[in-house]
Each structure stands twice: as structure tokens, then as C-alpha cells.
Image: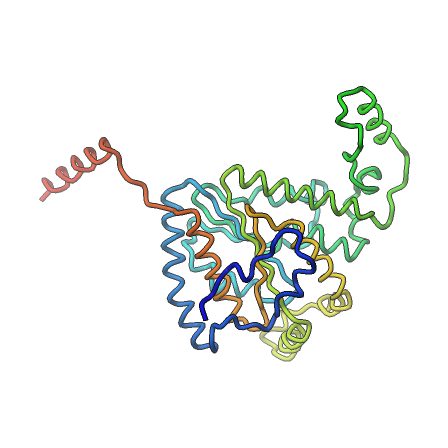
């Protein structure tokens, strides 16, 4: 069975996209030993593509990993992404925002580690957490201390704001000065506005030469429980477990509903989402590697070719070295 990355692709507007992907699928990769051997053959191809991307220094490449807890994001980083040249590949892990991060836009902290041209950036969690966790656990919105008009919906959404008339400015200014109290539960317009901001941000990245590729590691509730139990029972892995992980299992359906909307709303040709079956770690790692080969190949990275002047200077340098004896 040949692997086709399109089988894992989420199409814009897809209805409940997670229902169409089994977390325990093996994608025809065979058993674990076969998959590990295949991954070993894929990694040199990935490194070659990265080397050419880095040498050409035209495109930059951003990888985003999202998942429920224990789905294997760290394993993807360890077994797949560390195969890249670490001089031009940087992994950033985002936990809950604190301190100065909370005092800025939810996108702010993710702008600084964006990859430069020729580089690969990896976000282990990302700005997508801000349309996921606070949406399920509404109390986290209060920590961000947003102005009340900004929590009641989309502050920029008005029928006559773009009418070209003064009344649009007056209506907006009136909204700014309103003394309304921020709602404890933001309306749907608030979350749609954040998704619009993400779409706009990723469109800006695409226009600036950054290819954005996003992976959702699709883990079943049963497999998550098994992995949690393994962490509890193995003293060497106790540090990986947090009691909060179990509490979050109560919100499994809510998280999946939020993820479904995120995937269908923010998958775009210039920033696609791939749903990776994650119940078998070896399947997830090989699937991510193969999708990355596909995505990097789309950029056709090439080693730079010297022009006539460059070749002439190269010949001169060669003669100087040869004379050294």
C-alpha cells in the first residue's frame, strides 16, 4: 500500500474532520520493525531537503505540532525532527502564557522564534492553544485582562465601519467608551475573531516566504489512559505525569469539538493541517516524516549555482591552493 499525504489532509470547511481519521490506523506501514527501518531510509532524504533549503536561503519552513496530552509530540521532535541540521532548525515549546506574555496579544510570543530564510522552526504547541484551552476552560480568559469591548465579540465587526463616512468612526468610538462589563463566557464571535486573526497571520507568513505545515496527532482516549498509567507505574517516567492531565480528560469531548472547528477553519492551501494517527507511535513518526518530505519537496530547494564571475573566482582560488604544494 502506497502512502499518500493527501489522505491525512484536512480540507477547508470539512465537517467534523476528526471523525474521518482513525487514531489507530497503521496507514499500511506494516509492523513496528518495518516502520522503523523505513523511517531510517526516509531521514537522509529529509536531511538532504533541509540542507538544500538552508543553502538556498529563500524559503523558511514552520512546523506546528498540536495534540492532546501524551499523544507523542516530544517523540516526534526526538525521533524525526532532530534529524535535521540543528544549526538551522530550532524547536520552541510553548506552555501556558505567564508574566509579560499575558500582557500582549496572544500571537505576540510566537512571532519571535519564527524561522529565518533557509531555517526550519518547530512549535511544540503554539498560538492554537489560545483558541483551545480558554475556550474549554473559560476562566483562563479572565487572566488575560482584555478590555470589555474586546471580549464581547469582534470589536472591528460593524456594518458601517468601512462605509467611508464619519458615522463609522463615531460608532466605533462609542463602542470603545462603553462601560459594559466583560462577559464571563465570550460569545462565538470572540473565538471566530481569533481564528480570523490566525488565518490572517498565517497568510502574512505565506506572503513573506514561510511555508506553514501543521500536524494534529490524533490519539484515542483509551490509548491516552494506557500511556498515563504507564507514566504512573514507571518511576523513571513519573516526572512526565501531572494530575491536571487526568482532570482534563473530563473535557475530552469539548476539546475534540474545539479542535474540529480549528482544523476545518484554519486549514488552507498555504497552511495545511494534517491529521496523524497517533495510537501507534511508530506510525505517527513515519507519517510525519513522509509528509515533511512531500511538503519540503514542493518548495524545490536547490543548491545555489555560481554565475560566471563566481566560477572564475573559484578557479583562481583553486590555483592558489594548488601552488601551495
Nearest to the observer: residue 227 or residue 58:
58
Q: Residue furthest bottom?
A: 233
Name the residue at 83% across, 31% down. 176
Image x and y of residue 228, in percent: 66, 74
Query: How many discs appear?
Result: 0
Decide which of 178, 161 is in the foreground and name it: 161
Where is the C terminus found, in terms of image quarters? top left
Q: Residue at x 50, y 60 (%)?
A: 5
Tell me which colouring the rendered structure shows: rainbow
Q: Residue 70, percent across and down?
A: 62, 68
- Identified at 62% across, 55% down, the residue is 125
- Depth check, front residue: 318 or 249: 249
Q: Along the horizontal axis of the image, is 234 left or right of 247?
A: left
Residue drawn 76% across and 53% down? 134
Q: Position of residue 118 (x, y in %)?
A: 43, 44
The image quarter containing residue 182 is top right
**Quadrant housing the N terminus:** bottom left
**Figure quadrant of residue 174:** top right
Residue 154 is situated, as x and y percent measured from the top left of the image, at 78, 39
199 in relation to 136, above or below? above
Horizontal side of 69 relative to 139 (left or right) equals: left
In this rendering, would 42 be left or right of 26? left
User: Image quadrant of residue 193?
Assistant: top right
Classify 6 as above or below 236. Answer: above
**Front in this rendered view, residue 28 or 100:** 28
Amino acid at each position: 500500500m502506497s502512502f499518500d499525504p493527501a489522505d491525512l489532509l484536512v480540507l477547508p470547511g470539512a465537517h467534523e474532520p476528526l471523525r474521518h481519521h482513525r487514531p489507530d490506523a497503521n496507514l499500511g506501514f506494516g509492523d513496528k520493525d518495518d516502520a522503523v527501518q523505513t523511517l531510517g531510509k526516509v531521514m537522509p532524504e529529509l536531511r538532504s531537503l533541509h540542507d538544500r533549503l538552508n543553502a538556498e536561503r529563500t524559503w523558511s519552513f514552520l512546523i506546528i505540532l498540536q495534540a492532546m496530552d501524551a499523544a507523542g509530540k516530544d517523540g516526534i521532535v526526538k525521533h524525526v525532527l532532530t534529524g535535521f541540521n540543528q544549526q538551522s532548525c530550532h524547536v520552541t515549546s510553548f506552555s501556558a502564557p505567564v508574566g509579560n506574555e499575558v500582557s500582549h496579544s496572544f500571537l505576540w510570543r510566537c512571532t519571535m522564534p519564527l524561522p529565518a530564510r533557509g531555517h526550519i522552526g518547530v512549535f511544540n504547541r503554539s498560538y492554537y492553544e489560545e483558541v483551545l484551552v480558554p475556550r474549554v476552560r473559560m476562566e483562563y480568559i479572565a487572566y488575560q485582562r482584555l478590555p470589555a469591548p474586546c471580549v464581547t465579540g469582534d470589536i472591528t465587526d460593524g456594518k458601517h465601519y468601512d462605509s467611508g463616512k464619519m458615522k463609522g468612526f463615531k460608532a466605533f468610538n462609542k463602542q470603545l467608551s462603553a462601560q459594559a462589563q466583560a462577559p464571563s463566557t465570550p460569545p462565538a464571535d470572540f473565538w471566530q475573531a481569533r481564528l480570523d486573526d490566525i488565518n490572517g497571520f498565517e497568510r502574512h507568513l505565506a506572503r513573506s516566504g514561510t511555508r506553514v505545515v501543521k500536524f494534529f496527532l490524533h490519539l484515542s482516549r483509551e490509548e491516552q489512559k494506557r500511556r498515563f498509567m504507564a507514566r504512573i507505574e514507571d518511576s523513571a517516567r513519573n516526572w512526565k505525569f501531572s494530575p491536571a492531565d487526568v482532570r482534563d480528560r473530563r473535557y475530552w469531548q469539548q476539546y475534540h469539538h474545539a479542535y474540529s472547528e480549528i482544523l476545518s477553519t484554519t486549514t488552507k492551501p498555504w497552511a495545511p493541517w494534517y491529521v496523524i494517527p497517533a495510537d501507534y507511535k511508530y506510525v505517527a513518526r513515519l507519517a510525519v516524516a513522509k509528509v515533511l518530505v512531500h511538503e519540503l519537496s514542493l518548495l524545490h530547494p536547490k543548491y545555489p549555482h555560481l554565475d560566471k564571475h563566481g566560477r572564475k573566482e573559484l578557479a583562481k582560488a583553486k590555483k592558489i591552493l594548488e601552488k601551495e604544494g
